[in-house]
Amino acid sequence: MVKFSRVNGKFIVLALAMLLFSAFGCGQEDSKGTSGSGSSQALAGGEFNKFFPKKGGEFDVVFTQEKTGMAQAKLKKQGQEVAMLTVSDTAGNPSAAEKFKSSTTSIAGYPSADSGSFGSVILVGNRFQVQVRSQGDDFTQSDREAWLQKFDLGGLARLGAGN
């Protein structure tokens, strides 16, 4: 068995403590990014639910997923899924908002873009992407644009300004 003096033992304990401290410090991701609103962390997905359109008539809004920076719901018409509704926070991924800088179109006063042939998306408050994605040809671009305007866009913009 190897014998250590008190000085060597204290040195080893100190070295191990420094190693553990640096390992934990390096293992943490820096979740701070840059966004148009000045906030640096993506909000919890549940924060977005109140801004989604309300169910009404022959349409139901069924929430399917919440995670940090995103909430998603299915839009159903008479029990059949016709579209997916999504709000996502670009605070943790500012490059996601880049496509809107050159946008020449807008919906409800917010810059818009197409997302493939079945998606329409707007950027609210330079921070939140609001998207409606059709599940088929029966739900048209004008349907998607109409449903984008049913979100509480003003409330969402205020949410971004307050964080």
Image (cartoon, rainbow, N blue to C red):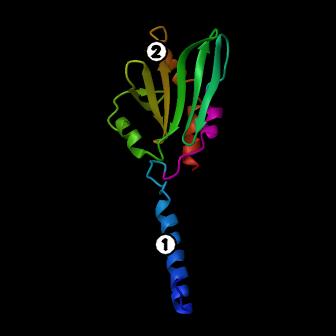
Identify the image quadrant of residue 102: top left
On residue 142, the disc is 2
Which residue is at 52% across, 24% downward? 148
- The one nearer the camera, 43 or 101, is 43
- The residues colored magenta run 38-52
Which residue is at 57% across, 35% downward? 154
Residue wearing tag 1:
19
Dot 1 or dot 2: first in sequence order is 1
Compared to residue 117, the image places residue 92 above or below, namely: below
Residue 141 relative to residue 48: left or right: left
Identify the image quadrant of residue 106: top left
Nearer the observer, disc 1 or disc 2? 1
- The one nearer the camera, 104 or 80, is 80
For label 1, count other residues whose C-alpha is less than 10 Å away and answer few (under 14), some (14-19) or many (20+).
Answer: few
Question: Amino acid under label 1?
Answer: Leu
- The one nearer the camera, 107 or 127, is 127
